[in-house]
Image (tube, rainbow, N blue to C red):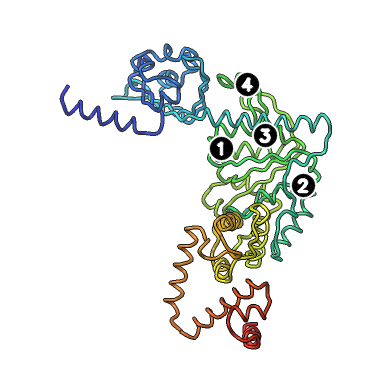
C-alpha cells in the first residue's frame, strides 16, 4: 500500500469521524468494515465491539429480516429515513432513524452503508409525555370531573387595541362551532394562549386540550406521537395511544403545521375527512371526536407558495381563520402592556418601579418588536431585575436593545441637524420625565425643571 493511499484513507476516516451522524459500513459478508464514534455512541457500544465483527454477532437481537443493512444488500434498494428499534449487546433498547444505501462498484454490490440519527432520548421523552397526558385524562373520563385542561381564557389576552378586541369577540362567537380553525401570526404574538382561550370558550371545554409542535420532530416519531403505535409494528413497539386518542372529545392543537412533512400531512387530511385513526402498524381503524386547531408563524399564502403545506389540507383546515396582529401594528398595546408587565414584576420582585422614562417609551414605540409580546415581556423582566431607581431608563435596556437604541439615536442626529427641532424634542422628553417622576404634579415638575409653573403650563398646552 502506497503512502498516498494510506494518507488518503486516514483523511477519509478523519472526515467520517467528524460527521455528527452515525456511519456503519458492512461488506458483502455482513462484517463491519467501518464504524465511527458517533454510531458507537448511538448504539451504546464501543467501536472495537463492532468493528471487524459480523453484524449479527454484535447485535444479536437483529436478524436478516430486521437488519436494514442486510436487507439493502439483498434487495439492492436503498431505504430512506426508516425507524429501527433494537437491543444492543448490553441489553439496552436503541432507537434510530436510518438511511441505508447499497455500495456498488462496477455495477456489483460490495456492501452497504447506514447513516443513523439517534432519537432514543426524544422518543423516551415523547412517550413519557403521552403517558402523563393519558394519566391526566383518565380521571376526567372516569369521574366525569370538570376540567378545562387549559391555563388561559380569551380574557387572558390583554389588549386595548380595537382590532385585537374585535378578533377576540369573533373568536368567542365561533368557539362554539366544531369546524377546524387556522390561526396565523408571528412568533411571540400569543397563538397558543389564543387557541387555549378558544377551547375554554367552546362546547368542548370539559374535554382535553392537547398541544403538539410539529417542528423539529422526525416524521416517523411524529406519526407515532399523533396516531399511536400497535404492538409488533416494529421491534420494541408497544400498544400506545396517540394524541388523537388522548384528545378524543376535546381539542388537538397542531402548532407550526407547515413544518409537518408533506407525506404525514396526507395522513392527517384523511383523519380530518372521516375522523378515523389507525395506529402505526395496526390494521384496525377507530373513530375519534376531535376538533383540530392549526397554527402557523408564517402567512398561509407564503406557506402555499413554498409548498410547505398541501393545498387540500390547507383548504380543509382554513374553515375559520384568525390573524393575530404583530405588536408593532398595535401601537396602543405597547404602552399598555409595558405598564402591565411593570406592575406584574413589581409584585414578583417586590419593587416599586413606576414606569419607563419618556426616552424609553418613545423608543419602544418605534422599535419593530420581532419577538412581539414575548420579547416585550422579557425586556421588561430584564430591566426590572437590573434597575435601581423608580423609572426604567435606557441604561437598563438589554444589551442588544441598548445597541439598537444608541444606533437609532445616532441615525436620528445625523438625519436632522436642525437645532430647533432637536431642542424641541429634548424639551418634550425632559418635561415627560419630570411629569412621570412627580406622578403628573405640575408644581413639583416645574421645580425639577427649574422653571415657573406658568411656563410649564404654557409648554404643556403647546405640546397638547
Residue that label 4 marks: 238
Query: Callout 4: helix, strand or loop?
Result: loop
Could you give the CA–CA distance between mark 3 and mark 2, rounded to whole angstroms?
19 Å
Could you give the CA–CA distance between mark 3 and mark 4, rounded to whole angstroms?
15 Å
Circle 3/circle 4 CB separation < 8 Å:
no
- Dot 3 or dot 2: first in sequence order is 2
Relative to 69, 433 lies left or right: right
Disc number at residue 327?
none
Disc number at residue 243?
3
| Residue in the foreground of this view, choosing between 248 and 156 | 156
Which residue is located at x 53 percent, y 53 percent?
Answer: 305
Could you give the CA–CA distance between mark 1 and mark 2, rounded to whole angstroms?
32 Å
Query: Callout 1: helix, strand or loop?
Result: helix
Which quadrant holds the N terminus?
Answer: top left
Disc number at residue 263?
1
- Dot 1 or dot 2: first in sequence order is 2
Percent position (x, y) of residue 373?
61, 57
- Dot 3 crowding, Cα within 10 Å, few <14, some 14–19, many 20+: many
Query: Callout 2: helix, strand or loop?
Result: helix
Amino acid at each position: 500500500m502506497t503512502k498516498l493511499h494510506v494518507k488518503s484513507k486516514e483523511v477519509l476516516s478523519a472526515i467520517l469521524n467528524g460527521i455528527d451522524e452515525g456511519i456503519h459500513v458492512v461488506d458483502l459478508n455482513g462484517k463491519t468494515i467501518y464504524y465511527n464514534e458517533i454510531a458507537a455512541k448511538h448504539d451504546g457500544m464501543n467501536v472495537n465491539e463492532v468493528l471487524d465483527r459480523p453484524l449479527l454477532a454484535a447485535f444479536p437481537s437483529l436478524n436478516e429480516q430486521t437488519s436494514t443493512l442486510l436487507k439493502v444488500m439483498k434487495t439492492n434498494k436503498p431505504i430512506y429515513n426508516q425507524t429501527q428499534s433494537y437491543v444492543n449487546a448490553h441489553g439496552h433498547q436503541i432507537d434510530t432513524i436510518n438511511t441505508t444505501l447499497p455500495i456498488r462498484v462496477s455495477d456489483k454490490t460490495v456492501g452497504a452503508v447506514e447513516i443513523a440519527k439517534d432519537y432514543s432520548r426524544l422518543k423516551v421523552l415523547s412517550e413519557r409525555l403521552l403517558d402523563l397526558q393519558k394519566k391526566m385524562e383518565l380521571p376526567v373520563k372516569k369521574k366525569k370531573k370538570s376540567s378545562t385542561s387549559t391555563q388561559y381564557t380569551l380574557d387572558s389576552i390583554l389588549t386595548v387595541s380595537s382590532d385585537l378586541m374585535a378578533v377576540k369577540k369573533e373568536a368567542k362567537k365561533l368557539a362554539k362551532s366544531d369546524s377546524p380553525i387556522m390561526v396565523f401570526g408571528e412568533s411571540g404574538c400569543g397563538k397558543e394562549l389564543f387557541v387555549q382561550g378558544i377551547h375554554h370558550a367552546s362546547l368542548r371545554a370539559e374535554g382535553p386540550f392537547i398541544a403538539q409542535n410539529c417542528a423539529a420532530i422526525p416524521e416517523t416519531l411524529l406519526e407515532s406521537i399523533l396516531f399511536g403505535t400497535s404492538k409488533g409494528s416494529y421491534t420494541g413497539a408497544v400498544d400506545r395511544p396517540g394524541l388523537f386518542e388522548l384528545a378524543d372529545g376535546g381539542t388537538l392543537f397542531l402548532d407550526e403545521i407547515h413544518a409537518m412533512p408533506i407525506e404525514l400531512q396526507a395522513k392527517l387530511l384523511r383523519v380530518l375527512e372521516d375522523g378515523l385513526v389507525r395506529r402505526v402498524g395496526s390494521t384496525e381503524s377507530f373513530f375519534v371526536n376531535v376538533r383540530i386547531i392549526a397554527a402557523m408563524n408564517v402567512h398561509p399564502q407564503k406557506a402555499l407558495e413554498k409548498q410547505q403545506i398541501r393545498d387540500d389540507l390547507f383548504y380543509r383546515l382554513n374553515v375559520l381563520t384568525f390573524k393575530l396582529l404583530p405588536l408593532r401594528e398595535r401601537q396602543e398595546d405597547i404602552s399598555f402592556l409595558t405598564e402591565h408587565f411593570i406592575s406584574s414584576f413589581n409584585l414578583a420582585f417586590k419593587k416599586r418601579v413606576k414606569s419607563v422614562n419618556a426616552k424609553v417609551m418613545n423608543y419602544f414605540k418605534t422599535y419593530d418588536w420581532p419577538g412581539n409580546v414575548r420579547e416585550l415581556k422579557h425586556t421588561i423582566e430584564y430591566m426590572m431585575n437590573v434597575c435601581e431607581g423608580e423609572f426604567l431608563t435606557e441604561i437598563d435596556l438589554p444589551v442588544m436593545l441598548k445597541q439598537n437604541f444608541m444606533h437609532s439615536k445616532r441615525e436620528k442626529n445625523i438625519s436632522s441637524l436642525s437645532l430647533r427641532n432637536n431642542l424641541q424634542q429634548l424639551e418634550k422628553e425632559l418635561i415627560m420625565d419630570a411629569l412621570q417622576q412627580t406622578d403628573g404634579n405640575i408644581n413639583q415638575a416645574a421645580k425639577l425643571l427649574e422653571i415657573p409653573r406658568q411656563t410649564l403650563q404654557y409648554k404643556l398646552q403647546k405640546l397638547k
